[in-house]
Image: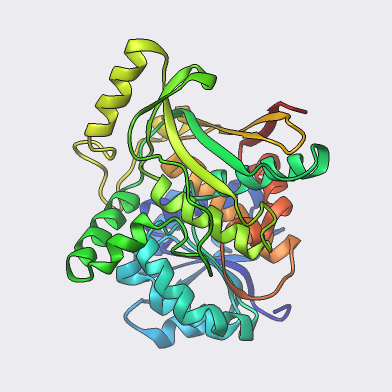
Amino acid sequence: MSDREFDVIIYGASGFTGRLVAEYLQAEYGDIDLNWAMAGRNADKLASVRSEMGVSENVALITANSDDPASLAAMAARTKAIITTVGPYQLYGEPLLKACAEGGTDYVDLCGEPAWMKDMIDRYDDVAKKSGARIVLSCGFDSIPFDLGVLFHQNHAIANHGGACENVRCRVRGMKGTFSGGTAASFMETMKRAQTQPEILDWLKDPFSLSPESGAPQPPIHKPVEEVDLGSWATPFIMASINTKNVHRSNALLNYRYGRDFKYGEMVLTGPGEKGEAIARGMAKTNAFGENPPKPGEGPSKEERETGSYDVMFVGDAPNGTRIISSVKGDKDPGYGSTSKMIAEAALTLVKDTQGKGGVMTPAPAMGKALLDRLQMHAGLTFSIEQGA
């Protein structure tokens, strides 16, 4: 792909998240060190966004539409990698993914729609392997901090404590910010599809539905529980339904680096005692997206994005008995500020830092430590070992 015109094209650059990605690439890399372009359905709107976001006029504008497969194939043929922020992906995503898989173009998205992801794996994994395209799903808050957090945790255990932890608990310790409108819309579309395809409910419940084979019985994470060893109550985490599937697929694609009996679960910590219990039970009964989640194309103010953050902990006991506690922290709101930086760096990792075989992948096996390093250097994420060094 060395002869391709662009390093990266942002598809959906006039949407709320897409324009944040464009703003980030301009601020972090400009148009000298990186040859990139903005793409979408409407050239006039793209030009307006390019101006509004302070993007150089040297950044090309490309018109392409999910209703026009030929335009998508032509766009994919011009670039080494495509970033797509156009969701819900089960409504708009397949034509572009197909074009990239067939054309040997690397691809990253923000998908958190497991039923659609299962379809794409079934339909295009072999196609992408043949063309060499690395199709990497879930490159935003779902699921990079969690997928790479487990990889970071397990790599430390393997290198220092005799092997991988058989059971890793992921616990969200803090999160300030909103879920993206795309995440909420994707959830609603998945529920609509489940009404006509009841088997989708089984896929949603199965932590191995994106994996080539099932594994060990997994820990219960679907109701509040007191975790005495952590000194806190824990309650279900809405994103566990996608993150756990991606983590288990990563394990499989990494040749079961975490073990074939690996167990993994995600919850939110709510604090100790009666107060912690009350919060846990209350959160379990409420809509995790809130009463009025943002619609696709909407999002928080710049101040809200800048003052957001998240703190995710991973706990596991290594084979030598050492308890390891690691963490991933982000310096912006998860759904927009941090997500826009993560997906940008994922694409750049594919283009600049890694080589590998094609296929429909998750972030950890596709990009691994190279992405982890980029996220810490550029995107405001911090990966740490807090206990068990």
Q: Nearer the viewer, residue 263 or 51?
A: 263
Q: Nearer the viewer, residue 231 or 4?
A: 231
State the image quarter where residue 346 is shown.
Answer: bottom right
Residue found at x 71% / y 45%: 164
| Residue 61 position (above or below residue 318) | below
Q: Is residue 59 left or right of residue 267?
A: right
| Residue 104 position (above or below residue 149) | below
Say if residue 31 shows up in the picture.
Answer: no
Q: Is residue 65 left or right of residue 155?
A: left
State the image quarter where residue 299 is shown.
Answer: top left
Residue found at x 35% / y 76%: 66
Q: Nearer the viewer, residue 128 or 121?
A: 121
How far from the left and from the top, in percent, is residue 103? 57, 84
Q: Is residue 385 left or right of residue 139?
A: right
Colour scheme: rainbow
In what quadrant of the picture does the C terminus appear?
Answer: top right
How far from the left and from the top, in percent, is residue 311? 53, 30
Q: Nearer the viewer, residue 312 or 94?
A: 312
| Residue 33 position (above or below residue 387) | below
In what quadrant of the picture does the N terminus appear?
Answer: bottom right
State the image quarter where residue 304 is shown.
Answer: top left
Say if residue 253 shows up in the picture.
Answer: yes
Residue found at x 25% / y 61%: 189
How far from the left and from the top, in percent, is residue 300? 35, 37
Residue found at x 53% / y 21%: 230
Count numbered badges in the picture: 0
| Residue 359 position (above or below residue 138) | below
How far from the left and from the top, in percent, is residue 55? 53, 54
